[in-house]
Image (cartoon, grey):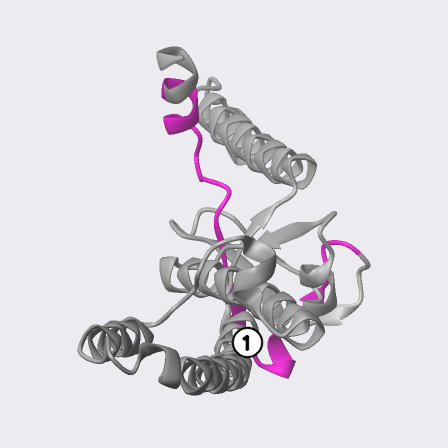
Amino acid sequence: MAAAVKDINLLPFENHYRLRKVSEIDCKACFICYKPTTSVLVTLNNTDFFYICFSHLSDPSFSDPIYDDEYRDKMKELNEKSDKVKLLNFRIKEKNRYGSWDKIMGFNYLTKKDDKNKKDDKNKKDNKDKDKDKDKDKDDKDKKEDKTDHRKKTLEDLEKELNLLQKDIINTEEIIQEKQKKNSFFKLNKDFYKIRLNNYFKKQNEKKNQQLYLKNLNKLPKLPDHLSNDL
């Protein structure tokens, strides 16, 4: 594993390119389709660069965008909100169908305010032992109305929460789309990255051979003066 990391560090440039634009006068042939283009991909250390049509950058078989941490956080946030929307839609659907989410879940889903109301009702019952039978029908009616109000309030709260969440999702999506448009960093497909590395090493070898040739050329024996004058 350590050897692999060492080899990666020895590469002349990493697979991390920045998109730049040049003027129309400086446009050159695209690396893929050979059409004239003003878009250029340049490595972070400026060792390698090539011209590329902007349309090729959206092709996953050629390259993938590289986004910052803020973008990834927004994507995570969007996924979490989308899951919450699904849950809220399901709860609202079940509320409308059964009238109570509590009933299908098998437990009481009461708010703190409802708990307080229950305690108040219990205290009132304890203080009215003599009128227990008389007020029984009235208490049952009040409880029924209270539960009905609770169901309506809970449903309204869910719908309100869903509405706010959907608006929030739209805002998050707009931020993500804006970041996608402004992104200028890309990672090449591994095959294209190998091609760029091979081109680099090929040029380096050609440059080295040329320098060696010129060096050897200077080492050639000089002609005698009388012969050089004749030439």
The residue under the point 56% across, 37% down is: 200
Asked if residue 19 is positioned above or below residue 206 in the image, the reply reads: below
Give the side of residue 74 with respect to residue 65, left or right: left
> Can residue 83 be seen at all in this image of the molecule?
no
Q: Position of residue 63 (x, y in %)?
A: 65, 51
| Quadrant including the C terminus | top right
Which segment did they paint magenta?
6-32
Q: Position of residue 128 (x, y in %)?
A: 22, 80
> Can residue 51 be seen at all in this image of the molecule?
yes
- Foreground residue, 141 or 4? 141
The residue under the point 61% across, 52% down is: 64
Which residue bears the numbered disc 1? 173
Residue 24 falls within the magenta-colored stretch:
yes
Q: Quadrant of residue 73?
A: bottom left
Q: Quadrant of residue 95?
A: bottom right
- Foreground residue, 18 or 222? 18
Secondary structure, mark 1, is helix
